[in-house]
Image (cartoon, rainbow, N blue to C red):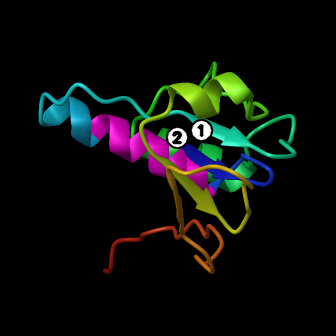
Amino acid sequence: MFVCEHGAARRVIASAYFNRLAKEQDLNYKAIFRGTEPDSILTTTTMKGLINDRFEIEKWKPEKISEKDIAESYQIITFDCNLPNVSANEQWNNIPPIILKTLTKST
């Protein structure tokens, strides 16, 4: 499980690519994403980037982390937030914000 405060950008991207790679490698793992104080929607930049990378995100929405999520997770990775009393926790702090770059062809 990937967790950040708003649950609308970095952890969404991390879980999307984790799930894509796990499927390609035929691994029996699935990542979910949660927020401690989730936004109501994904950020515009996150949506644009994921759509450009051919992810189907229509039903993706930030959700608040629950005790059930914690209990059922094999590994929890947090992005710049803290989950007290969680043993399976790895922190990925100070990761830069999401910036969408537009590629253009040179003439």
Kind of element beneath mark 2: loop
Circle 1 sits on which residue?
Answer: 33
In the image: residue 22, left or right of residue 42: left
Work out whether residue 60 or residue 51 is closer to the camera in this orientation and state it: 60
The magenta region covers 10-20
In the image: residue 19, left or right of residue 59: left
Quadrant of res 97: bottom right
Tell me residue 59's x, y (percent): 63, 19
Work out whether residue 85 or residue 94 is closer to the camera in this orientation and state it: 85
Real-space CA distance between mark 1 and mark 2, rounded to the nearest whole angstrom: 6 Å
Residue type at the position of mark 1 = Phe
Work out whether residue 12 or residue 1 is closer to the camera in this orientation and state it: 1
Residue found at x 79% / y 33%: 64
The image's mark for residue 47 is: none
Indicate which disc, 1 or 2, sits on the residue closer to the N terminus: 2
Assess whether residue 100 is covered by the magenta stretch. Answer: no
Quadrant of res 39: top right
Q: Is disc 1 in contact with disc 2, using a CB cutoff of under 8 Å?
A: yes
Marks counted in the figure total 2
Vertical relation: 18 (above or below) 79: above
